[in-house]
Image (cartoon, coloured by chain):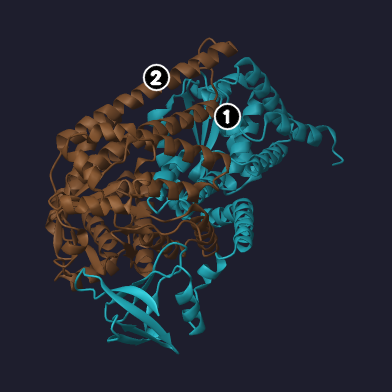
Amino acid sequence: MGRPPRSGLRILPHRARSIRRGAFKLDRASRGALVCDEMGETDSGLRAEHRKALDDEPHVVGLTFSGRGSEYFRIWVVNLALTLVTLGVYSAWAKVRKARYFRQNTRLDGHVFDYHGRPVAILRGRVVAFVLLTAYTWTFQFSNAAGVATVAMVCALGPWLLMRAQQFSLANTSYRGLRFGFRARTGEAYRTLSPVIALWLAPAVGAALTRYDLWFVGAFTLALPWMHHRIKRYQRANASYGDSRFSFTPALGRFYWIYARGVGFVLLGSVLIVAIVVAMSMRRGHAEPFAASSHLETWLYGSLMGLVVYVAAGPYYAARLQQLVWSRTRLGAIRFRTEIRAKPLFLLVVKNVALTLVTVGLYWPFATIALARYRIECMRVESEMPLSALAGGVQASVVSATGEGAADAFGFDFGL
Amino acid sequence: MFPASRFDGRHADAVPVRLRVEHHDLIVETADGVVLDYEQLGHVVVSEPFDHTPRLIGLPNGITLEVYDGDGGLTGALQQAGVRLPLAVRLQRHWLGVVAILAAFVGLLAVGYVRGLPAAARWAAFLLPPRLEHRMGEQFLVVLDKHHFRGTRLEPQRRAQITERFARAAAAAAPGVTYRLEFRAAGKNEINAMALPGGIIVMLDGLLNVVEDDEALAVLGHELGHVIAKHSTRQIFQSVGVGTLAGLLWGDFSGVAASVPVALGVLRYSREFELEADDFAVMLLKTQDLSAEPLYDFFLRMLEEEHERHRADIPIFLSSHPSTKERLERLHQRLYEPSR
């Protein structure tokens, strides 16, 4: 039923050649929004003909995603209902089923990914996260001393927990029967993440203890690209697949550049909204547009503004940063690239937000699938040899025993 | 016979194989019939069937089989051999069932929100040690002092007068209840009074500047009603509950971190809480040989103020919900239709 399964192997020689010629940009711009989706259908005769002549050309393989909104909707509803009935306990099982659905529907070179996380481990992780977050949220309500103590504890445990979380996520993901992995050591985790966590908590602590909240927020904002880059580099450079390691070429300057341009967009959007609000109040005859608005209206405009900024700036950041991060990531001789672009992503997010609002949330699972499809199908994996030929050289990691132990310790999600 | 890819878990190579299900066993063999694996079905883990994915079968020794089961033949064979699908999978197979589950979910969510959450918040609020609740209130006051309040400009004499009169009434209406009255000023003469967790009652100059002493007593009685029923603590717990549940259901868990502080900021009482506090205020007034009239007058005054001020600085804690009009009507009934 539905569409026939696509061929997973999608070597696109004509495309690879256009990259060589430098005609890639032009080619890309001339295509429509769903460029990534269309590329699946390559004429097989043409492919064979080209392959011979292009043995020295890189092989470009795309990922495909076969998830369907109508199918995921049913999974989502059952997950929600069981989570509610069990007062949240089932959320760990729900998470596993969701992760399996998305990974197993993701296909590269004819084979799918899989997820092996154990719900009990995830539940354990969630209990720990819940306790820490509750403590962090509440202690400042009781006393500053207790609040500072909690922050100190979060700082002390944070890097280790984040490291475990990353280990859990990767070590429980497999492809072709081999697990991914995360090889950071405790020392490196603390060196890398402690400053990030400290900066992350700075605005809250600053607001609670001093009168200089704005300074803390300012420092936080300026450091945000640095923090983001540091986390990405740490995550990518320590990831592994079987016995081969991923690598990441630093790109701090580019991170700052993308963030700066994103801020520009946000400012532009905000100016636009302020203009609209002022114009609306003027028409109703208020002299002071903002002073005269009640609390409810302030809330309304505030959330509207947030939504617009999210819709406008989010896709830009996501697309540009993913392009950048993937282009700097390698796995041995394998290179990565994503053809994700801000404009189609923006249109997709607009459509998702609009339909989710109109359907009182029922479109949510369809939106999740649509977004996943776009992101996944934009991925390209490039190598000198076909992936199936490279696969012979990859073995299971020697440290997989400890890796598996780590994989069971904590299931943690931070959404970084 | 089902064609499959076999991964040994040590190398990334895919070996093409064929599967057979016989009685309660799974047999894996190469194209030329060499048997590679022979396992009881009870020992293998078969992935949940999705519409467009291969089935993944995990054997005990780390071997994975990837089977493209487009026509459902393998699913049928497994079912015949007695491999049952998990409950969640069976629940989501039919649209009608899913719609029924969705309806039940929405219903349950609504009942939980209307009944379960307030009950749980009430239980938690009365379980919370008074010492902790008190500290929470103090911390609230510190934050409000820093960002919102100024010192009072009221004459000490009037303050003492109000405090004393209220103390007498409180002792009569609710003996043994501890509270602390604080005077502050805020905004452009903001008309407001509020009860913080742990019994701290804050009176703003803006309010005291426009009311008579009896009305001030009525408002304080109303706030004491909030204190006795622990309304503010219950309200906070309810908001947190909503945030936590929403995070669990819609976000992955990290969503909780984002939603909780937002929920804390919205300290607004429900209709029931306000009406309950009104009733207590009337009771307190009665102990001082007063009718409900001062409270009625106060709300009338608020209504006028609302019109005058273009709804700009309306006190959120007092008049948000239910509407001042509704409360006026209710008090009117008590004042002039005593038969009810």
Q: Answer above or below: position of B265 versus B233.
A: above
| Residue at 87% across, 41% down | B339
* Residue B17 rendering spot, x and y as whole percentages: 31, 77
* Chain A painted colour: brown
State how far apart marks 1 and 2 are (Cα).
49 Å
Residue in front for this viewpoint, A126 or A16: A16
Q: Amino acid at mark 1?
A: Ile
Toward the viewer: B154 or B258? B258
Look at the image and tell me in which quarter the C terminus of chain B lies: top right
Nearest to the eye among marks 1 and 2: give it.
Answer: 2
**Is residue A152 at least partly visible in the picture?**
no
Colour representing chain B: cyan
Mark 2 lies on a secondary structure that is helix
At 53% across and 27% down in the image, what residue appears? A295
Q: Is residue B317 left or right of residue A309?
A: right
- For label 1, count other residues whose C-alpha is less than 10 Å away and answer few (under 14), some (14-19) or many (20+): some
Q: Which residue is mark 1?
A: B162
Q: Quadrant of residue B90?
A: bottom right
Residue at numbered disc 2: A271
Q: Amino acid at mark 2?
A: Val
Instruction: Determine whether, in the image, residue B17 is placed left or right of residue B298.
Output: left
